[in-house]
Image: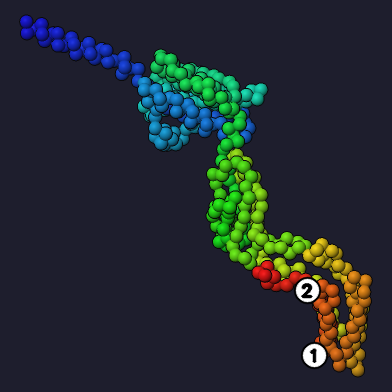
Amino acid sequence: MLFLKTINLKFQIMLFLFLMIPGILSAKTAAFIGVQNLSQNPQYDYLAAFTEGVILFDLSNIKEITLVERNRLEKIISEQQLQMSGLTREGQEKKSVEVGKLLAADYLISVDYTLVNGEPAFTMRVADTATGAVRAFSSRGTTENELHKLSEGVAKYLTGKNYTFINEAEKRSLLTLRDTIPGSISLYCNLINAEILLDGKFAGYTTGNLYEPVAIRDLDPKTYTMRLHLTKDFGVVKLPEFTFSDWEEKVTVNPGRITTLRSVINHFNNTIYNHSRLLDAQYELTDKKPDINENKSLSFTDRKGKNISMKISLSGSRKTEGTTASCVFQYEGKNYSFKLSKDEKTKEENIGKIKFKIMLNTSYSQKDVISVDVWRTDIHQGMHRE
């Protein structure tokens, strides 16, 4: 009787193990080794990451399939100096078996895609690392469900069970997904520590390095208003009105692309000075060249947009009894005359929206110098703070 009980116990243990074996044997380890864009068109590269994400998410929900950890996969592939794509192609049976042993994976899975008549065409290849045999699954269409079809196919192949990942609600177009991929801005600017504002929100500081840009990454594709602010003394001047503001520009960020901007910003006073000095000329009279006759035309646009024209007719003579100079300055068609001699060496006058100044310098032994200055009086340094 004891003998029968012992046999019965052994039979129950064997039966339990036998029932458990199918579940043990049905567990598969798979390594997803990559997605490749075969279209040779880089504008569709964005599909690779999205394809991998969808398929891995689907397969991770199948209890009978264990996925090799990504870090471990990349480490081994790198150590073996192997390409992550192509291991499941025809003629790679031996390599697939070798990699499968290194990864302790039963199957290697890869996907490639191209564009056929404007539609993405996907091919998933599953290599059996025990035999090197490759099974292929294909799908073609423009929605996310084309990727779920691939997941369903490989799930049935590896487990023998039917899984449903297709969702009729997921009909967003794969071809418009690229419109949601983040882009970035590379900004070159000469200012140091100016605030970078995108649509009024702080995005960083400038470095002043015109050779290394400031990178602003992970931006939603759209058009932004970028503004750079340092102090009230720096920015851009709108001409001819001479209104002052921070540097500001519309910038469109395209999905997956880098938009490059270059901003050169000046001190307001420097800008005002450069526009206010209309003429700063010197003419030398020597024993070899004692006479001068010079004619020059000038003009500027005033703050109301009116063009102001001027002409200068200058003559001078270096003589033993003393150097003399005369000048006729024409402003908007009206003439103003000036004469210089040893007794009166400087003349200046405000005329319209300019100041005219002429000087005779006879302090040098080998030459005499006539200086003519013309600058605007409707603008002045510091006006940006008023």
Considering only order in the chain, which callout, 2 or 1, is on the residue closer to the N terminus?
1
Residue 145 percent location from the top left of the image: 53, 22
How many labels sit on residues? Answer: 2
Q: Which residue is mark 1?
A: 363
Q: Residue furthest left?
A: 1
Q: What x and y, as percent, mark residue 241? A: 76, 63
Residue type, numbered disc 2:
Thr
- The answer to whether 221 appears left or right of 108 in the picture is right
The quarter in which the C terminus is drawn is bottom right
Helix, strand or loop for disc 2:
loop
Q: Nearer the viewer, residue 374 or 109?
A: 374
Q: CA distance from mark 1 to mark 2?
A: 30 Å
Splitting the image into 4 quarters, where does residue 64 fall?
Answer: top left
- Whether residue 5 is visible here, answered yes or no, is yes
**Residue sitting at 66 percent across and 64 percent down?**
266
The residue located at (13%, 8%) in the rendering is 7
The correct choice, above or below, for 299 with respect to 136 in the image is below
Q: Nearer the viewer, mark 1 or mark 2?
A: 2
Furthest-front residue in this view: 386
Q: Residue at x 53, y 24 (%)?
A: 169
The image position of residue 250, as x and y in percent, is 66, 49
- In which image quadrant can residue 19 be found? top left
In percent of the image, x 93 and y 71: which residue is there?
A: 333
Q: Of the residues shown, which amino acid type is indicated by label 1?
A: Ser
Judge the density around disc 1: few (<14), some (14-19), many (≥20) Cα neighbours within 10 Å. Answer: few
At label 2, counting other C-alpha atoms closer than 10 Å, the crowd grade (few under 14, some 14-19, many 20 or more) is: some
In the depicted structure, whether residue 359 falls above or below residue 63 = below
Residue at the spot of label 2: 377
Residue 349, given in percent of the width and then of the height, sits at 83, 81
